[in-house]
Image (tube, grey):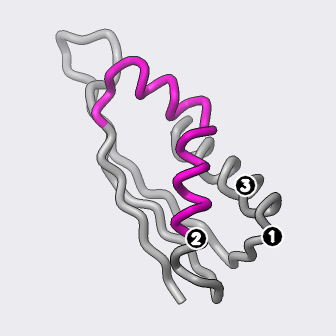
Amino acid sequence: MSLAGCITTIYKIVAENSKFAFKQITVDLEAEKPKDKATIAWVTGGVEVQTDEEEQKAESVFRVTMKRCPVGVLFENANVDMNLTFKVKK
């Protein structure tokens, strides 16, 4: 839940700073914490943004978001396998 909240919040901030307008963002994630581990081992799922703007700009905002999202950075530094897809909906 913390990663999903971070992605939505940071995406909105990056989009505003980039003058990128979107109507909605949906983040659907699934994670697993094995019984023998203290932390999450992997996260998989998708991010979908509804916009009338160019798909390339939406993807660029997403890439910047993932570099700036503190939870995502923590997961990456902890070697949590993150497999996220990104989709633009018109």
Tell me what residue is drawn at x 56 percent, y 40 percent. Answer: 67
Give the amino acid type for the residue marked by disc 1 in the picture: Lys
Alpha carbons under labels 3 and 1: distance apart = 9 Å
Q: CA distance from mark 2 to mark 1?
A: 11 Å
Dot placed on the residue nearer the N-terminal end, 2 or 3 = 3
Q: Which residue, given by chain and number where applicable, does mark 2 sit on? A: 58
Which residue lies under the disc numbered 1? 19
Residue designated by label 3? 14
| Residue in front for this viewpoint, 56 or 66 | 56
Q: Of the residues shown, which amino acid type is indicated by label 2?
A: Ala
| Badge 1: residue crowd in 10 Å (few <14, some 14–19, many ≥20) | few
- Residue 30 coordinates in the image, percent (x, y): 33, 45
- Residue at the image point whose x is 74% and y is 76% from the top: 21
Residues packed near mark 3 inside 10 Å, few (<14), some (14 to 19) or many (20 plus): some
Q: Is residue 40 left or right of residue 35?
A: right
Which image quadrant: the C terminus? bottom right
Above or below — where is 81 with respect to 50? above
Q: Amino acid at mark 3?
A: Val
Q: Which residues are magenta?
A: 57-81
Q: Quadrant of residue 76?
A: top left
Label 2 vs 1, first from the N-terminus: 1
39 left or right of 26?
left
Disc 2: CA contacts within 10 A as few (<14), some (14-19) or many (>=20): many
